[in-house]
Image: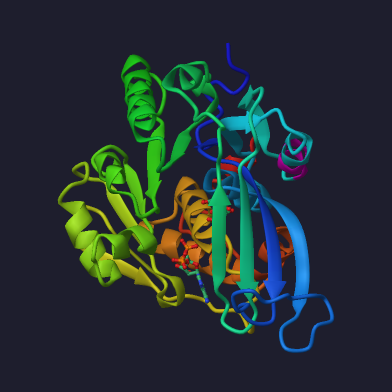
Amino acid sequence: MSRFKHECGERILCVGHVCVDIVSECSTYPQEDDKVGTTTKSNRCIDQRWQRGGNAANNCTVLGALGAHPSFCGTVAASHEKSFILEDFAKYGINTDNVVVHENCDCPVSCVILSAATGSRTIIHSNKNLPELTANDFAKVDLNDFGWVHFEGRNVSNVCNMIRHVREFNKKHPERKPLTISVEIEKAKPELEALIPLPDVLFVAKDYAKFKGYSNMDETIETVQSLALPGAMIICPWGEVGASASSTKGTIVHSPAYPPSKVIDTLGAGDTFNAATIFALCKGCTLEEGISFGCKVAGAKVGVRGWEPLREVVKHTIPLVSSADETADLLHRT
Ligand code: ADP
Ligand code: FRU
């Protein structure tokens, strides 16, 4: 029997991708055929680092920094980057029991350019041959350990089956609080539409919204809501504009963005927003409180370099405002 049975109400499992991000922070975005160095005059490489990346992996990082004990479920190549990835998960208190390791393949890598001049993050991602997680892999996860499962929108047919599996688990276990299912659709890929009707909580990123031709958050929410599960929450973050959300009750709530004094690193801003919003909803916050917390944590993230400083920043600057905060310290259970 699971260690967490009946005590794991809000433990969060994030299902999706992990990769290595090689991040170069430049004073301005380089010209084609430029050579940018540490001491070059016209444009300078301010910092360069390796980070663990990938949407679901970043969600876990933020949940870990907020003091939750998240779990990551996804595939990892048995390449020389594997120990970097697994050690970095451990650093943030992220459980990796549900990682599936594949031999004879390469680790996916993103080359990322951050522009200090504009705050942009340009991502060039390559995933040559790492297999995706299968529904059979996912069926081995002990869902008793969790209260919430978040899926990154990718690997669509498998993820549809995984969601079906979680729904069946909920039906078979009426004695426990049903697992909440959330999905993020982010990438400009038409097949992601199949995921819209499935979750209880749907995050729609502005990249997907723009790809569909929606011009703002409200238009995105209204259009997507008509395709979603009745009663589902639809949440849409939109960079410097902040975020909006609605449930089928129809009212759209909004949060402004909380810009830092200087925007340093917007890589993973959306992943941060999603994770922090999930954290707040788990704690019993309302949808409005949830997206406001998401924007505050994401605003703090874009003001710091990489992930490491986020832990300190959130500890000191962001009280989680919730009517249920006093009583629902659920994520800290071990
Ligand atoms: P993505 O990483 O998917 O492009 P967004 O750009 O939509 O994500 O940003 C997600 C959230 O991060 C926004 O809702 C906002 O709260 C915060 N955010 C992003 N960029 C900024 C910024 N320049 N200033 C303040 N907050 C920001
Ligand atoms: C940011 C991110 C990066 C990764 C890329 C993968 O949202 O997860 O960490 O390189 O997107 O698409």
Residue positioned 41% across, 31% down in the render: 179
Judged from this view, the residue extending furthest toward the top is: 1
Direction from residue 59 to residue 172 in the image, left or right: left
| Residue extending farthest bottom | 42
Position of 275 relative to 180 (above/below): below
Tell me if 57 is positioned left or right of 306 in this view.
left
* Residue 275 falls left or right of residue 242: right
| 45 vs 221, nearest the viewer | 45
Q: Quick check: can you spot residue 334? A: no
197 with respect to 121 (left or right): left
Q: Who's the residue at 50% across and 19% down the image?
A: 137
x, y percentage for residue 109?
63, 47
Which portion, as a residue range, is magenta?
86-91
Q: Residue 82 falls in which quadrant of the image?
A: top right
- State the image coordinates of residue 298 (x, y, percent, origin top left): 55, 65
Decide: is 99 above or below 315.
above
Residue at the far front: name it. Answer: 33
Rendered residue at 66%/70% (across/down): 317
